[in-house]
Image (cartoon, rainbow, N blue to C red):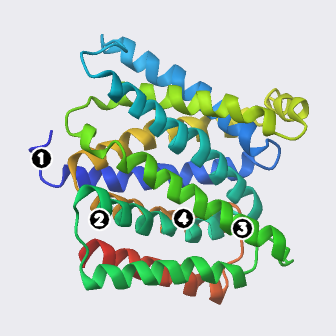
Amino acid sequence: MSGIPYIGEIFALAAPICWSIAVILFRKTGETVPALALNLFKNVVSVVLFFGTLYLMGDTLRRDVPTGQYWLLIASGAIGIGLSDTLFFMTLNRVGAALEAIINTSYSPSIIILSFLFLGERLTPLQMLGVLLILSAVLSVGWMRGPGSQEIPRKKLIAGIGFGLLATSTQAVSIVMIKPMLDTTPLIWANCWRLLGGLAMTILLLPLLPQRRAAMRSLRNFKVWPVMVPGTVMGTYISLMFWLAGMKYTLASTASAINQTATLWTFVLAAWWLHEPVTGRRIAGLAAGVVGVALVTFG
């Protein structure tokens, strides 16, 4: 497959399209299901899907690889699936899908800086300018309006930005730490071990969940399943497969920049599907982020 021209870029573009649809579904789910409970449900369903896929392919969890690789994948999943996705849901529930999409552009600078430091990838001056534009877009969220006619309380908005930045930075760490392995590692097998780490981290975080019993009961509200289940399949199975395939078949910095088109898709879907307001400030912040991503990609 690596011989197909631009196959990595194609996968990297398919991932954000699927992910943006999932974000809208997760936003609706988050109205009744707390972030950590939703992440637990998502991870359990994902484990079933990926392990079922591994079984149908005739593969097994055990491979002839150093033990350290297993632990690296588990750690990557704990950080990028267990912790980062919980932080992402916390951000989404506080600021809405459109503002979260702008905050999420910080993923590109995070992974590019880490790729520069640990993978030997290099940045041009135009890419550095792009990083600065993306950061300015994220900071501009602090002056934007939230869903509905009322301003998001300042404390809630700042918390949402903080959780969002933590989500993107931990996500970047989780993928850069396994990037060298992806060149020789089967994606389904790698995802299975990452998901085990993510599920374990989610379970470890459960004692920190306020009103745990009420939160877990929310998962038994079958009225939300028609939204929660498709969001999980689209966001954590299909999108994740495309995302890792993009990382496998092209540079980490290139794939991460293309992944950022999720900002555009999510922003549009949030306005169309969730009826979140489209204001001049939001468009300006979005434009800064998109231009920054373009400079990072083509600079």
The location of residue 214, given as percent across then percent down, is: 90, 33
Q: Amino acid at mark 1?
A: Ile
Q: Residues within 10 Å of mark 1 (few under 14, many from 20)?
A: few
Where disc 1 sits, the SS reads: loop
Q: Which mark is residue 275?
A: 3
Find the distance from the CA under tag 3 to the CA under tag 2: 39 Å
* Tag nearer the camera, 4 or 2: 2
State the residue position of label 1: 4
Q: Are marks 3 and 2 in contact (CB under 8 Å)?
A: no
Return the residue found at the far left: 3
State the residue position of label 4: 104
- Between disc 4 and disc 3, whose residue precedes? 4
State the residue position of label 2: 116
Picture layout, residue 36 above or below residue 18: above
- Between disc 4 and disc 2, whose residue precedes? 4
Q: Residues within 10 Å of mark 2 (few under 14, many from 20)?
A: few
The residue at 37%/60% (across/down) is 114
